[in-house]
Amino acid sequence: MHKVHHAFFAAALLVLLFSGCGRRDTAAPPVSAVPLAGFDGARALAEVAALVALGPREAGSPNTLKAADYLATRLRTLGLPVERQTFTAAAPGGTATFHNVVGKIAGRGRGLIVLGAHYDTKGGIPGFVGANDSGSGVGVLLELARILKHGWTDAPDVWLAFLDGEECRESYGPHDGLHGSRHLVQQLVAAGRTNEVRGVIVLDMIGDRDLTVTLPPNGDARLTALVLEAATREGVRQKFSLAPGPILDDHQPFLDAGLPAVDVIDFFYGSAPGLHDYWHTPADTLDKVSADSLQVIGRVVLRMLTSL
Ligand SMILES: [Zn+2]
């Protein structure tokens, strides 16, 4: 294992770690309940494959802009309006440019839910394409975009936020890592929408075929309970547990702003249970990502949406 400062692993090393029935828009298609049965893990895996095919996505690299363009095009193809957030921020080595891509599903006046996943990959690792970290979260979000684009009964707005700059260059701090999530929080504050936020659900590293989601203690208690409740209802509760220590990831800037947020992440990603030897290595390839695991996460998130 190389020397690393990953979002959660830095913490891990320290602690082990780790409608109302509002009027329907006349142009919109019929609205139904959250389409639980619609989520297709195989489609989500195909989305991961398409992203990974673009290659490494280190923040600030030309390839990251290519990935951002791809994600925006993909969302528009799926029928969603897209907001591009291109911004600069201080970073090790000087000011860097980042690109968030946010797909927006219009709700019916019941607030806002943010579903987030980073799409950048850790730099400086030859051959690292980040199928699980970060492709898996992207794949689930795009599949959610496909099935949620028309909203559902009694729906809040849903933002599908593809975040840049989660990975740090050197070590996590105010100017290194979590750039995209910090920027999105600033945008919510500037728009005066923080009071509308009903929940922020961040997905990261959730494609491992041996799915062992570890919910960190630095997460909103109600959202954490909702994840576990949804997992129980899905019959997959055994795949979810509480992490023994805090995890630093894209949910943290939302928590810091007083917003309810939870990080759905599988801490253990490796060649045997309890190991993480695939993480931030060239072994993080598409063959390690499972459509079944993506399906589990997609359905758990959909169940949560009905409770938020
Ligand atoms: Zn990472």
Image (cartoon, rainbow, N blue to C red):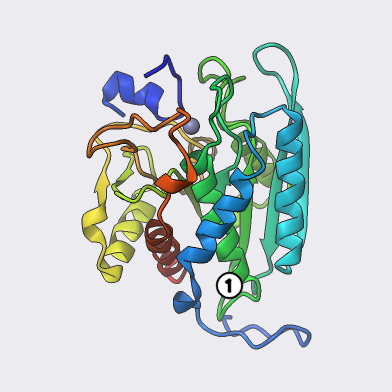
Q: Which residue is mark 1?
A: 147
Of the pair 45 and 267, the residue shown nearer to us: 45
Q: Is residue 182 left or right of residue 226?
A: right
x and y, in percent, of residue 56 in the image: 62, 33
Q: Left of 178 or right of it: where is 288?
A: left
Residue 90 falls in image quadrant: top right
Neighbour tally class for label 1: few under 14, some 14-19, many 20 plus, Cα within 10 Å: some
Viewer can see residue 149 = yes
Image vertical order of residue 301 relative to residue 135, above or below: below
Q: Residue at 36% x, 24% y: name it.
A: 11
Residue 50, how many percent across, how many down?
62, 52
Residue 172 in the image: state x and y as whole percent. 51, 20
Identity of the residue drawn at 45% across and 36% down: 284
Q: Secondary structure at mark 1?
A: helix
Q: Is residue 288 above or below residue 61?
A: below
Tell me residue 97's x, y (percent): 76, 28
Q: Is residue 258 left or right of residue 57?
A: left
Residue 258 visible in the shown view:
no
Q: Residue at x 39, y 47 (%)?
A: 220
On screen, residue 233 versus residue 189, left or right, reads left
In the picture, residue 170 is in which quadrant? top right
